[in-house]
């Protein structure tokens, strides 16, 4: 079976937005920032504050941590989009072949055979079929 896809920069933006909010590394980043900021705050101020002040500070720190994660995600997406070119095999035509020994992807720049046992998951959205290889690597097919 053969499937053709023509990936554009807009396709990459949508795919990256879909994946970013489901990535365990983003949750880890938010928790790291939140715990770090909260730890520094309580180290400097101590635990002598009222409960309402403590809760307010924890919520404030959580908001900053989420804002930092969103900013880093958007920066990563922008850099990915700016560095993606057709010659590197990211944009343009992608041909997918279902083979007995795996999924074969052919672009202008490369050929990749992903063995069936190395595919972590296959995700179908309204716009894409994402073949997840690991927590950050996906082969994308416009659906």
Image (cartoon, grey):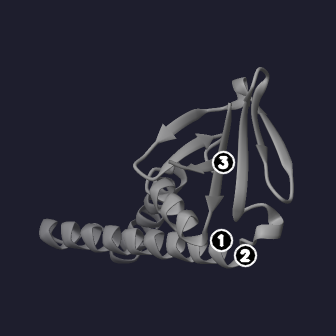
- Residue on which the image places disc 3: 4
- Residue on which the image places disc 1: 80
Local secondary structure at mark 2: helix
**Circle 2/circle 1 CB separation < 8 Å:** yes
Q: Residues within 10 Å of mark 2 (few under 14, many from 20)?
A: few
- CA–CA distance in space, label 2 to label 3: 23 Å
Mark 2 vs mark 3, foreground winner is 3
Identified at 15% across, 65% down, the residue is 51
Image location (x, y in percent) of residue 89: 78, 61
Image location (x, y in percent) of residue 111: 85, 46
Identified at 54% across, 64% down, the residue is 11
- CA–CA distance in space, label 1 to label 3: 22 Å
Q: Residues within 10 Å of mark 3 (few under 14, many from 20)?
A: some
- Asked if 62 appears above or below 117 in the picture, the reply is below
Residue 12 picture quarter: bottom right
Q: Residues within 10 Å of mark 1 (few under 14, many from 20)?
A: some
Local secondary structure at mark 3: strand
- Asked if 14 appears above or below 2 in the picture, the reply is below
Left or right? Give the position of 16 relative to 50.
right
Image location (x, y in percent) of residue 55: 20, 66
Looking at the rendered structure, the number of numbered marks drawn on it comes to 3
Local secondary structure at mark 1: helix
Counting residues from the start of the chain, the first of labels 1 and 3 encountered is: 3
Identified at 86% across, 59% down, the residue is 109
Farthest residue in the top direction? 100
Counting residues from the start of the chain, the first of labels 2 and 3 encountered is: 3
**Circle 2/circle 3 CB separation < 8 Å:** no
Q: Which mark is residue 42?
A: none
- Residue on which the image places disc 2: 83
- Asked if 53 appears above or below 12 in the picture, the reply is below
């Amino acid at each position: 079976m053969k499937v053709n896809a023509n990936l554009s920069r807009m396709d990459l933006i949508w795919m990256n937005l879909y994946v970013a909010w489901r990535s365990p590394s983003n949750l880890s980043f938010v928790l790291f920032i939140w715990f770090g900021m909260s730890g520094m705050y309580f180290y400097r101020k101590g635990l002598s504050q009222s409960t309402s002040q403590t809760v307010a500070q924890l919520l404030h720190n959580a908001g900053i941590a989420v804002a930092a994660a969103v900013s880093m995600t958007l920066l990563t997406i922008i850099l990915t989009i700016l560095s993606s070119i057709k010659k590197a095999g990211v944009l343009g035509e992608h041909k997918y072949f279902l083979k007995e020994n795996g999924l074969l992807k052919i672009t202008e720049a490369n050929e990749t055979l992903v063995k069936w046992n190395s595919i972590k998951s296959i995700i179908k959205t309204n716009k894409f079929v994402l073949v997840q290889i690991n927590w950050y690597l996906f082969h994308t097919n416009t659906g």
